Image (spheres, coloured by chain):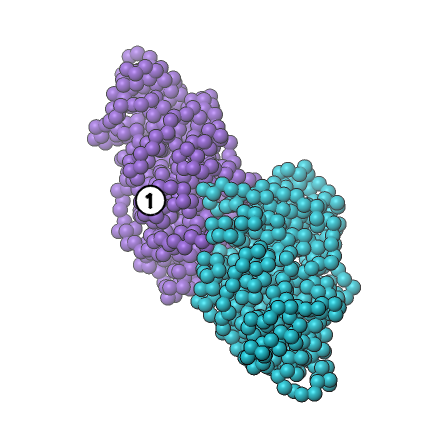
Chain colours: A cyan, B purple
Amino acid sequence: MTANIITKVSFIVCFLLVCLQLSSAKWAKPRRLDAVSRSQNRLRDDRCRQFKTIKQNVDHFGFSNMDTYQQRYTLNTDVWENGKPILFYAGNEGDIDLFCDNTGFMWDIAPIFNAMVVFAEHRYYGQSLPYGNQSYSNPEYTRYLTSGQALADYAYLLDYIHSSIKGAELSPVIVFGGSYGGMLAAYFRMKYPHVVVGAHAASAPILQMTTPCEAFSRIVTQDFLQESAQCVDIVRSSWGAINRIGSTASGLQRLGNLFKLCNPLKSVDELKNWLLDMYGNIAMVDYPYPTSFLADLPAFPARVFCSNVTSAILRLRKNDDEDVVRRIIKGTNVFFNYTGQTECFDTGSQGSPSLGDLGWSYQSCTEFVMPMCSDGVNDMFENQPWDFQAFSDACYDQWKVRPRFEWPYIEYGGKNLTDLRFFSNIAFTNGNLDPWSSGGVRTTVAPSLPAIPVIGGAHHLDLRAANKADPPSVLQARQQIVALIEKWIS
Amino acid sequence: MTANIITKVSFIVCFLLVCLQLSSAKWAKPRRLDAVSRSQNRLRDDRCRQFKTIKQNVDHFGFSNMDTYQQRYTLNTDVWENGKPILFYAGNEGDIDLFCDNTGFMWDIAPIFNAMVVFAEHRYYGQSLPYGNQSYSNPEYTRYLTSGQALADYAYLLDYIHSSIKGAELSPVIVFGGSYGGMLAAYFRMKYPHVVVGAHAASAPILQMTTPCEAFSRIVTQDFLQESAQCVDIVRSSWGAINRIGSTASGLQRLGNLFKLCNPLKSVDELKNWLLDMYGNIAMVDYPYPTSFLADLPAFPARVFCSNVTSAILRLRKNDDEDVVRRIIKGTNVFFNYTGQTECFDTGSQGSPSLGDLGWSYQSCTEFVMPMCSDGVNDMFENQPWDFQAFSDACYDQWKVRPRFEWPYIEYGGKNLTDLRFFSNIAFTNGNLDPWSSGGVRTTVAPSLPAIPVIGGAHHLDLRAANKADPPSVLQARQQIVALIEKWIS
């Protein structure tokens, strides 16, 4: 499984107009979090665009750099009453309006608590750029992109809200977040229990850094396997087919044409990385109702993908490499061209400009090394080991930093699950379809740290607005969260 | 009350051979913590000098600076058994052997728990200097001196101990500390409950930053008042006497001669700062048995000071300014010349080279602004308001940093006492004679956050080795701590 940094980098080229190129390498690389968040979201909520800003210190943890920047956030008091709670979203790696649009659960329950609703943008994403368009230009500007600095931003913002809004002085705060935002929600409660009384950490892979590297790939495979074993076999065989066809220049060109790529393929890795991202993304957004993310998607996209791939067998005559590739193409159309309106595809285009892939690349090169590997036997990918040194070297080449593998569990805990027992009031929700659940807290460690399963749920489904197609488990999970909040604020 | 930064700076001149000079100013400035620790300690314990070192990241909270440094610590396993606890001292602003020598309580109780005993030196103090003798030379080197970086050092050190010492993998850790070290002990448990199961925070003024500025001066005064009201009156009147005598060049010279100062006085402020430090120090080390700190001290030094000051009335004929000054000199001899062997006094010499006044100056100019003031009515000092702006300006002049007054309560809590309710397993001990108890947690906020009073106790008396002159309250406090540790590790 060659993977992400490389595709990420080619995407990055467009994102901040910095042209970088990393050579491909034969080792598995970390996945992006938040495929969901990389949505070209169609459900625009005006309340998510009433932006405010607050002046923040660029460096909370040192005093010699006195630079400040403007952090963006939204604050809604439509249903809020004096002294009532603040529902606070710990923004993750993207524009805050995107998360605000996609976290309907907070809006849904605000009236129950007569709550204020606040969404805070994570530094270095969206328009909260400490050094403007130079923020990623050199290590001296990039160095303040850490989870700890983001949490300190949130603590300052809440102190400001508490002290500046009349009637909010004693309003208890509940923090929410999904994916990396879910990690931040958990960390916020863990590190700042004096600021937030409880956390809803949805699909938060806080244990991913110490989880066996193959876990993610296996869950992705499982999602497809529950639809069709034949489908998984075809995907598994597709890598060899792509390698063989792409082994010549003309074959590479042929692959580009078959996949309708807009630009000539530079290598089979480019194509395979694009596909790998897609499989992970389909698993993450395997929701029970149609959604409009990277493109319009049907309900249960893994099911539709497999249906397309396997039904193609009736129409294709030869079971050779090109047949396999054509089956995969039938499947990819589910994800990339469901409406049939796309003329060609860009292998760097799975991320939307609303999501900060550049920032996440930096964060996965520093604090959040999430090892990824596959064996081609227990999963449907190529055999690709995890190679920390190679990953670290690539990070150094790109960012002039090296990751500290041990940092998250030293700073936040989670080396062993029992480490968490001294924390409190964090609800961990995880969907069994979500590959990131591999790094989630799926065992209740202490009564105040419940692990709430969402059977049939993909990546933080529970944070989305209520939908009539929601499985019973997500309704139960949301009810449980509401009951916990009642308890936390009492 | 003119105060400390200025005298501190003149001390600093000798400490790291950097010559700085700040002009005096008419505003009250923060006190030094840990007069106790500035001891020329006579009780040298060999176990406190078996140093080890560990390589630490200079910047735990960022990744662009990859420098490392060697942190010093001691580790003793004389009575330790596999799996049994680790008693860990969170080093504060000085050489770690000094704290090790003066924290007999940990050594006393180690056999009860068959515990390992570890003392970790705080970065930028002792020999744990991130940039060697250049550590304080410019803001780029100084910027990593923060409590947060120190706590991360401790977390890394404990992770290393847990993973490298066979049998220590599951050893629970109890953290101890006194004064600023007590703050660190509390903060360590608050921020790293996955690393330490409980904390004994002795004389830890974690609320000092939000405590009324006059509180410290009033407790100092109270300590002397309980010995003699006349004594307090004399001290109160001495400032005017010193001002009047010192208002001329010849008077200033006369004062220097009377006080047997080694060097000519530059201003009355220099003398008054020296005396102010002394009163605070006497209050802090007002122990019930003789101790050997800055100089040899009798038991109950405040009592002896007042006895000297008031009994002098019988021998001095004229009750004029010089008489008042001579009485004070009789008192100062208790603190500076108890053995009668000192020929002259250096107004910059209350700190010992073992204590890092330079570092504490930086820390009080960044994270730990502890406002100090006096009114001359409810206390025995001059009327001196607190002036944050003047303090901040002096910090900028000296260090090129400005303090963030709100940082400690945002980062660690304590803006309101109830903020602390979500933390657990921290025992706060405070002696009623200790002026730093003004910023201590003296109210039990939650069952697992007991506030333990030490009646008749000065600055972290409870951390010292058992002594037959110990008051009953300190014996009870220590018993309570032992019982709590039993509970925490069970």
Q: Residue, x 36% and y 51% (percent of image)?
A: B120
Q: Is residue B396 visible?
A: yes
Q: Quick one: SS at disc 1?
A: helix
Q: Is residue B297 visible?
A: no
* Horizontal arrangement in the rendering, residue A304 relative to residue B482 (left or right): right
Where residue B163 sits: x, y (%)?
40, 64
Where residue A229 sits: x, y (%)?
66, 81
Q: Residue furthest bottom?
A: A318
B79 w.r.t. A238: above or below: above
Q: Residue, x 75% and y 45% (percent of image)?
A: A78
Q: Residue, x 27% and y 17% (percent of image)?
A: B254
A405 w.r.t. A327: above or below: above
The image quarter containing residue A427 is bottom right
Q: Give the camera-side residue of B303 and A441.
A: A441
| Mark 1 chain | B
Total of numbered circles in the picture? 1
Q: Residue, x 53% and y 53% (percent of image)?
A: A136
Where residue A446 sits: x, y (%)?
58, 60
* Horizontal arrangement in the rendering, residue B310 relative to residue A113 (left or right): left
Q: Residue furthest right?
A: A468
Q: Quadrant of the N terminus of chain B?
A: top left
The image quarter containing residue B332 is top left
Where residue A239 sits: x, y (%)?
58, 79
Q: What residue did someone put label 1 on? A: B134
Q: Give the camera-side residue of B191 and B167.
A: B191
* Horizontal arrangement in the rendering, residue A332 relative to residue B41 (left or right): right
Residue type, label 1: Gln
Q: Give the camera-side residue of B218 and A289.
A: A289
* Dot 1 crowding, Cα within 10 Å, few <14, some 14–19, many 20+: few
The image quarter containing residue A34 is bottom right
